[in-house]
Amino acid sequence: MPTRKLEDKNIRKLTKVGQRSIAVTIPIELVRELKWREKQKVVVKKSGSKLVIEDWKK
């Protein structure tokens, strides 16, 4: 598998999951930097024309 160009490294595709959901993978480097774990709860918010994903707080 060829290595992606540096500028294309964080380009991701949306993937259909089930009938009503869409998923996108997050680069492992960013997950490690944020110290996120598998199955961790996150909050997805819409901010203008962007999506913001942040850690869920009780």
Image (cartoon, rainbow, N blue to C red):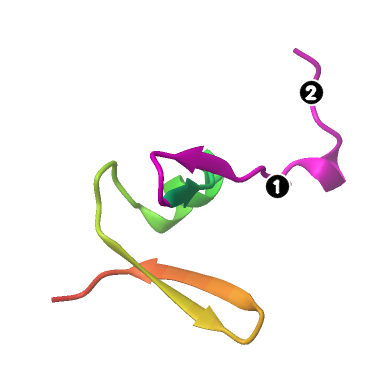
Q: Residue at x 62, y 75 (%)?
A: 50
Q: Residue at x 73, y 46 (%)?
A: 11
Please provide percent x and percent y for residue 13: 66, 42
Indicate yes or no whether the magenta region holds residue 29.
no
Q: In which quadrant is the C terminus drawn?
A: bottom left
Secondary element under disc 2, as helix, strand or loop, is: loop
Image disc number at residue 3 = 2
Q: Does 34 appear above or below 48?
A: above
Q: Residue at x 38, y 39 (%)?
A: 18
Residue at numbered disc 1: 10
Please provide percent x and percent y for residue 15: 56, 40
Tell me which label, 1 or 2, sits earlier in the chain: 2
For the image, the number of numbered tags is 2
In the picture, measured across the screen, residue 8 lies left or right of residue 19, that is right
Q: Amino acid at mark 2?
A: Thr
**Looking at this view, is 32 or 4 the one in front?**
4
Inter-mark Cα distance, 1 to 2: 12 Å
The part of the chain drawn in magenta is 1-20
Please provide percent x and percent y for residue 7: 85, 47
Please provide percent x and percent y for residue 33: 47, 53
**Looking at this view, is 33 or 55 the one in front?**
55
Secondary element under disc 1, as helix, strand or loop, is: loop
Q: Amino acid at mark 1?
A: Asn
